[in-house]
Amino acid sequence: MSSIGAFFDLDRTLIDVNSGLLWAWHERQLGNISRLLMARAAFWSALYHLSLVDIETAFGTATRHYRGELEADLAARTRQWFHRDIAHCLRPGAARAMASHRAQGHRLVLLTNSSSFEASVAAETWQLDDYLANRFPLDDQQRLVGRYQHPMCYGPGKVELAERWAQAQDVDLDRSFFYTDSHSDLPMLERVGQPRVVAPDPRLRFVALRRGWLVLDWS
Ligand SMILES: [Mg+2]
């Protein structure tokens, strides 16, 4: 019989911060990105929560910035940053929910718009079984070519990636759970049988109340 998945968004769901913005701050402090790019990141981040932005354009610009960077360097920098700035931001309720799903034999999967570098460290740190995140093609010297792999792990792209994964892993999405805070995740909330809303943004709160979805507070 196929198994049940428990999919988790990362930013403002498992953790109580937007790690993308914190990463941009971190990169700014190291001098790896310009003040202009930092300002743009903050601007996009603000709009991101209102779901107004053309996220693909914003993400494309951010990704181009890393063209030529060695994958190993970026992975090491992300790992160090994650353990210093992000690991302790896990919400207490998130830890309890993950433990409960694990005890029931469900497959735990991070489903996030963050980078695969960050998602892999998060999955390892909090013992999730797998992660679905944004991946970046490399050249033959293992340097980023400055693009991201389509579909972007955002909105309907999350559904596409989750469906592909579920089929390969024999997981039944109709019986699976998805936890998120964001209205942009509505397609995936509608795809699973057990949608769960965590500390939602105002638009998602409205939808959740109208549909009678469970709204959780993991603080
Ligand atoms: Mg989120």
Image (cartoon, rainbow, N blue to C red):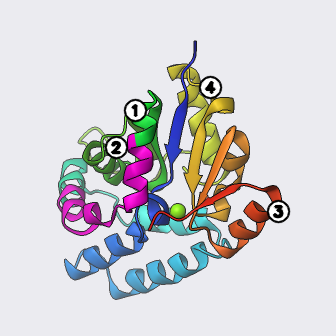
| Cα distance in 3D space between marks 3 and 1 | 31 Å
In the rendered view, tell whether residue 95 sits above or below residue 49: above
> Bounds of the magenta span?
78-99
The numbered mark, 1 or 4, whose residue comes first in the sequence reads: 1
Question: Mark 3: which amino acid?
Answer: Arg
| Residue where numbered disc 4 is placed | 172
| Residue where numbered disc 1 is placed | 103
Dot 1 falls on a residue whose secondary structure is helix
The tag on residue 197 is none
| Cα distance in 3D space between marks 3 and 2 | 44 Å
Across and down, in percent, residue 2 comes to 57, 17
Across and down, in percent, residue 193 comes to 69, 37
Q: Disc 1 vs disc 4: which is toward the camera?
A: 1
The tag on residue 138 is 2
Residue at 48% x, 68% y: name it.
61
The numbered mark, 2 or 4, whose residue comes first in the sequence reads: 2
Left or right: 9 with respect to 184? left
The numbered mark, 3 or 4, whose residue comes first in the sequence reads: 4
Image quadrant of residue 206?
Answer: bottom right
Q: Is residue 53 visible?
A: yes
Label 3, residues with CA under 10 Å away: few <14, some 14-19, many ≥20: few
Question: Mark 4: which amino acid?
Answer: Asp
Q: Is residue 152 visible?
A: no
